[in-house]
Image: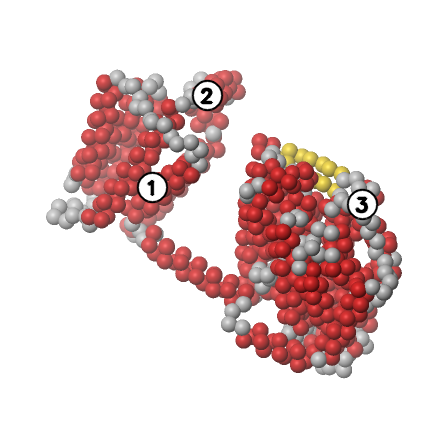
């Protein structure tokens, strides 16, 4: 396949997100009228897990952002990745990720939402590490997988706790159970689980470090995952759970402080970068922090600010990432000090960069200006820490305005510089995205009423029903938000003019920090590997005795501990079963055989005593009317006895003068007695009460009719539980083959 053919096929795949985008546009009028559309398919109905889909204003907005950005990213990638040897694999991963993100924002069931949540984690790992020949890319992909994947597992615990409290996993039903959840004793643990999941996904402090490292991904992936989709998953989760868990002091205080702190940290670190892509990554952290901070509020202006800035950021950041990709692809570098005067060779790309950067900085006439005014109005209405929220918003936006100038002015309007590659305009498929998305920032700014009515207002009302009217205007009059917007641009201009000393000072201070998130991650990974190596050396040292001791000991402690912790009432006295004398004699014979095994100094004697125990178990089966089980037990016992005896006869004789170390013997005895006592007590406790005979009745009624067999045990093994039996056969066969190969190798 030629390069031209690859580009054409890649561009054709943009039809998938384009058709989904069109389908979502059809749902916009219903969302504007407050009508949500629901679908449901049964998945695991036994535990109340369905594939539920809900299409409302919030999911429509996110879906439009995902698919709309996806169209331009796919078109961009068709040219950008045309020469890559894994071109087809890239598009497969990209489209699978897009579908997983759509599943996440449309899911109306907590469990299915979690499945799509982790699918995005797995696919982002494959996309970030797409250049798998690069060690740095593999490391960064692994880091993103571990951080976001661990957060997802914590989130699952929170979901399961929510389902246990309210009795449903349906997301649309949770809003009506908000008081039950917030008054429950487990509210704070549930809140912590949900917030950890959101914070890891949306790169909030102290989990922010994975996002800049994820810039090892190809640039179109950064434009898609790290501006408009994956990192917004945590924001979507917070918005969805706002009516369920929000409004409390714990919710508001945590989100305002963590979000505001993350925004300031990301803005400061962005100014200290010289790589354009990493600069955008840190401004993404800043923007995500702002979104989290405003979702901590419960007033309509604060939540409107969050949704408006969500749209603003998705537009300008995806455009700027694509612009940086064009610069890197056509000029050969992303270092800001090595590029300049690109307006002469890249006029259309310059237009896309300029419009996106002006929206990012908050210039009048652009949607970013309206977003900042609404943001300041929301900050002033915060119930928790309004001064901190306003200060964080102003300072971080001022630094972001300076970064916008660094990205748009210096590379394109600065003095022309010699670049590694002669710069020229990119193909139409690459510049179309940043030009169109940048222009949307201007068009939306000129028609804010339309944006507010058809996009922002339905999304806000979906999770914050209110009678307050939401209006986006280009000019709200001379008020505090306007003054704060002018202050932001003034401060941003000052930082831009002093950018070189500020960048050097920031970079030096960051380098001097004794520890940061990335170093803590590496320290944690090193400690984990060292601990795992020590545990492996201790437990897996080739001693079968230690293996059995560990397995049985852990089983005993875990089972006993679980039983004790979950006991609601103290256990009553256990009653021994009433048995005929002959059966008591059989029990005594088996107990005596156990004593012989413990005291024997001869291997053959110990094996024979074990045979007596197994034969006694066969007799018990026979006494209670299970001759087939008795025959099976007897055959297995006899065969095991013969094989073990043959093997042991080939071993050197035991040293009759040596004795085992006393502490080791006492530990063996303690574990053995503990395990035996636990199993005996559990057996007596289970048989002491009435037995649930539902399965017995089912097998009795269906063995002959459904499985055409009259031996119920055989039917269970080969029909009802045939896969279990097959698995056991495979395990035994594999173990036999492994043993044979080891013996054959030793013989050679």
What is the x, y in percent for residue 659? 16, 48
Mark 3 Cα shell of 10 Å, populated few (<14), some (14-19), many (≥20): few
Is 605 on the left-hand or right-hand side of 440?
A: left
SS label for mark 3: loop
Q: Which mark is residue 467?
A: 3
State the residue at coordinates (85%, 65%).
478
Q: Quadrant of residue 717?
A: top left
Distance from the alpha carbon under mark 1 to that under mark 2: 30 Å
Nearer the observer, 52 or 634? 52
What is the x, y in percent for residue 31? 80, 44
Q: Quick one: label 1 or label 2, which is nearer the N terminus?
A: 1
Tell which tag, 3 or 1, sits nearer the viewer: 3
SS label for mark 2: loop
Mark 1 Cα shell of 10 Å, populated few (<14), some (14-19), many (≥20): some
Q: Is residue 182 above or below residue 530?
A: above
What is the x, y in percent for residue 317? 73, 63
Nearer the observer, 719 or 265? 265
Nearer the observer, 190 or 527? 190
Q: Residue furthest left?
A: 657
Residue 19 appearing in the image: no
Q: Which mark is residue 693?
A: 2
Q: Quick one: label 3 or label 1, which is nearer the N terminus?
A: 3
**Which residue bears the numbered disc 1?**
552
Is 386 on the left-hand or right-hand side of 132?
A: right
Total labels drawn: 3
């Amino acid at each position: 396949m030629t390069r031209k053919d690859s580009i054409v096929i890649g561009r054709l795949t943009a039809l998938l997100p384009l058709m989904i985008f069109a389908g979502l546009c059809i749902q916009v009028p219903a969302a504007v009228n407050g009508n949500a559309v629901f679908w449901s398919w049964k998945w695991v109905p036994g535990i109340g897990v369905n594939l539920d889909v809900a299409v409302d204003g919030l999911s429509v907005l996110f879906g439009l952002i995902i698919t709309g950005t996806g169209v331009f990213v796919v078109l961009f990638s068709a040219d950008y990745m045309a020469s890559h040897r894994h071109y087809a694999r890239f598009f497969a991963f990209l489209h699978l990720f897009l579908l997983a993100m759509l599943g996440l924002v449309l899911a109306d069931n907590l469990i299915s939402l979690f499945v799509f949540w982790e699918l995005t984690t797995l696919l982002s790992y494959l996309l970030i590490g797409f250049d798998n020949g690069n060690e740095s890319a593999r490391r960064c992909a692994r880091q993103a997988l571990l951080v976001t994947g661990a957060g997802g597992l914590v989130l699952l615990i929170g979901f399961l706790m929510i389902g246990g409290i309210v009795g449903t996993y349906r997301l649309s039903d949770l809003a009506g159970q908000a008081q039950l959840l917030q008054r429950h004793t487990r509210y704070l643990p549930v809140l912590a689980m949900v917030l950890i999941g959101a914070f890891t996904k949306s790169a909030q402090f102290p989990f922010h470090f994975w996002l800049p490292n994820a810039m090892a991904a190809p640039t179109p992936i950064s434009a898609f995952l790290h501006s408009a989709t994956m990192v917004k998953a945590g924001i979507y989760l917070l918005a969805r759970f706002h009516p369920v868990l929000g409004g409390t002091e714990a919710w508001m205080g945590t989100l305002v402080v963590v979000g505001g702190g993350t925004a300031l940290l990301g803005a400061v670190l962005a100014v200290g970068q010289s790589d354009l892509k990493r600069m955008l990554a840190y401004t993404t952290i800043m923007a995500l922090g702002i979104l989290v901070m405003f979702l901590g509020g419960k007033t309509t202006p604060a939540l409107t600010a969050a949704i408006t800035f969500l749209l603003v950021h998705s537009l300008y950041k995806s455009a700027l990432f694509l612009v940086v990709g064009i610069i890197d692809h056509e000029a050969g570098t992303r270092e800001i000090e090595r590029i300049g005067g690109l307006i002469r060779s890249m006029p259309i790309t310059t237009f896309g960069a300029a419009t996106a950067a002006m929206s990012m900085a908050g210039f009048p006439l652009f949607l970013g200006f309206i977003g900042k005014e609404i943001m300041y109005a929301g900050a002033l209405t915060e119930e928790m820490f309004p001064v901190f929220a306003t200060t964080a918003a102003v300072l971080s936006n001022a630094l972001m305005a300076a970064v916008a100038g660094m990205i748009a002015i210096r590379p394109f309007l600065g003095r022309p510089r010699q670049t590694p590659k002669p710069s020229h305009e990119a193909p139409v498929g690459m510049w179309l995205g940043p030009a169109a998305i940048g222009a949307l920032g201007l068009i939306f700014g000129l028609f804010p009423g339309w944006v507010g009515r058809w996009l922002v207002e339905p999304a806000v009302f979906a999770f914050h029903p209110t009678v307050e009217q939401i209006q986006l205007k280009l000019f709200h009059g001379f008020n505090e938000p306007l003054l704060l917007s002018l202050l932001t641009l003034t401060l941003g201009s000052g930082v831009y003019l002093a950018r070189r000393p500020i960048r050097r000072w920031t970079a030096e201070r960051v380098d001097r920090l004794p520890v940061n998130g990335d170093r803590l991650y590496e320290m944690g990974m090193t400690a984990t590997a060292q601990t795992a190596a020590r545990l492996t050396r201790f437990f897996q040292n080739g001693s079968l005795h230690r293996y059995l001791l560990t397995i049985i000991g852990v089983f005993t402690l875990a089972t006993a501990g679980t039983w004790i912790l979950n006991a609601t009432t103290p256990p009553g006295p256990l009653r021994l079963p009433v048995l005929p004398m002959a059966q008591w004699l059989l029990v005594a014979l088996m107990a005596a055989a156990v004593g012989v095994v413990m005291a024997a100094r001869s291997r053959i004697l110990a094996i024979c005593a074990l045979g007596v125990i197994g034969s006694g178990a066969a007799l018990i089966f026979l006494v209670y009317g299970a001759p087939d089980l008795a025959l099976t037990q007897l055959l297995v016992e006899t065969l095991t006895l013969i094989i073990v005896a043959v093997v042991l006869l080939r071993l050197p004789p035991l040293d009759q003068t040596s004795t085992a170390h006393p502490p080791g013997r006492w530990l063996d005895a303690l574990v053995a007695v503990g395990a035996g006592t636990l199993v005996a007590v559990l057996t007596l406790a289970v048989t002491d009460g009435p037995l649930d005979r539902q399965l017995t009745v089912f097998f009795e009624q269906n063995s002959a009719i459904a499985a055409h067999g009259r031996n119920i045990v055989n039917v269970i093994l080969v029909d009802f539980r045939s896969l279990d039996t097959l698995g056991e056969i495979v395990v035994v066969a594999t173990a036999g083959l492994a043993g044979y190969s080891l013996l054959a190798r030793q013989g050679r």
